[in-house]
């Protein structure tokens, strides 16, 4: 069974701090998604990656396929980054978004 | 572009009632998905569609039905609502099976 574990479950930071959220999974994958969900709000796709690293503004996502691990980094964190960050993986078997397994999310709170 | 539009935003149903959650996208995406999100749990796939006229069950389809008569619309039907269907429902779309997801803003449903 494919399992996706995120750590930490909850994270509180001060504005300006460097943030790291981790995602580990148990099976071979075709791709990994990072999503952002603001409180009471919708879900936004941040990254989809299958190797290496991607960067968008202050957000960086990395993946190590051999170690079955991905990290989401936020540089110079800001209160508006406060949200739940969700990792989801597309397993090799099937290999499509309709086979996605989601983590439970990491709640990030950035205090001013 | 409006992206993915879900209606209604909130709904309270009595046990045994029926309703349809609407989802429409204007991006000409072939793939569409319905998820439910329960507190402390990862998103679970209810149904998905890979194109007009084609639908299939996801992980938790019991108590729900879908149709996909056009590329744009993917309504989710709840028949005989039960308290276990109290959840937040998200519709999403993607252009291909492995590509970033576009989510609607969600429908918060309470069944009492």
Image (tube, rainbow, N blue to C red):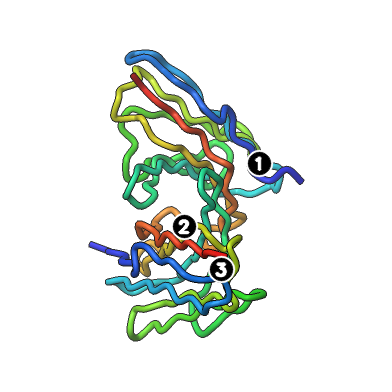
Tag in front: 1 or 2: 2
Q: What residue is disc 3 on?
A: A47
Q: Chain of mark 1?
A: B
Res A25 label: none
From what the image shows, is residue A46 above or below residue B105?
below
Q: Chain of mark 3?
A: A
Where does residue B30 sit, x and y in percent of width and height? 60, 48
> Is A40 positioned to the left or the right of B46 in the image?
right
Q: What residue is disc 1 on?
A: B25
Q: Residue at left 58%, top 43%?
A: B104
Query: Is mark 3 in CB contact (under 8 Å) with mark 1?
Result: no
Q: Nearer the viewer, residue B57 or B43?
A: B43
> Where is residue B52, by image quadrant?
top right
Q: Residue at left 36%, top 60%?
A: A103
Q: Nearer the viewer, residue B13 or A96?
A: B13
> Is A58 positioned to the left or the right of B108 in the image?
right
From what the image shows, is residue B101 above or below residue A21?
above
Q: What residue is disc 2 on?
A: A84
Categorize mark 2 by other alpha carbons within 10 Å: few (<14), some (14-19), many (20+). Answer: many
Q: Residue at left 64%, top 74%?
A: A56
Where does residue B73 sit, x and y in percent of width and height? 61, 34
> Where is residue B80, by image quadrant?
top left
Give the position of the C terminus of chain B as an image quadrant: top left
Marks 1, 2 in one chain: no
Where does residue A77 sit, x and y in percent of width and height? 57, 72
Tag in front: 3 or 2: 2
């Amino acid at each position: 069974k494919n399992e996706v574990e995120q750590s930490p479950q909850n994270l509180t930071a001060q504005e300006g701090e460097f943030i790291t959220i981790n995602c580990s999974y148990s099976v071979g994958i075709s791709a990994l998604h990072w999503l952002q969900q603001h409180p009471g709000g919708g879900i936004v796709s941040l990254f989809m990656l299958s190797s290496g690293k991607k960067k968008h503004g202050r957000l960086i996502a990395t993946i190590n396929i051999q170690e079955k691990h991905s990290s989401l980094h936020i540089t110079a964190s800001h209160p508006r980054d406060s949200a739940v960050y969700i990792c989801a993986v597309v397993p090799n078997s099937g290999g499509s978004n309709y086979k996605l397994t989601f983590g439970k999310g990491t709640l990030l709170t950035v205090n001013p | 572009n409006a992206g993915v539009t879900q209606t209604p935003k909130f709904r309270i149903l009595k046990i045994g009632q029926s309703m349809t959650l609407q989802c429409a996208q204007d991006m000409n995406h072939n793939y569409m998905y319905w998820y439910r999100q329960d507190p402390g749990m990862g998103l679970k796939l209810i149904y998905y569609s890979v194109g007009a006229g084609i639908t299939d069950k996801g992980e938790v389809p019991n108590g729900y039905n879908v149709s996909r008569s056009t590329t744009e619309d993917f309504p989710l039907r709840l028949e005989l609502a039960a308290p276990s269907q109290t959840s937040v429902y998200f519709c999403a779309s993607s252009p291909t099976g492995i590509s970033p997801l576009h989510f609607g803003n969600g429908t918060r449903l309470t069944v009492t």
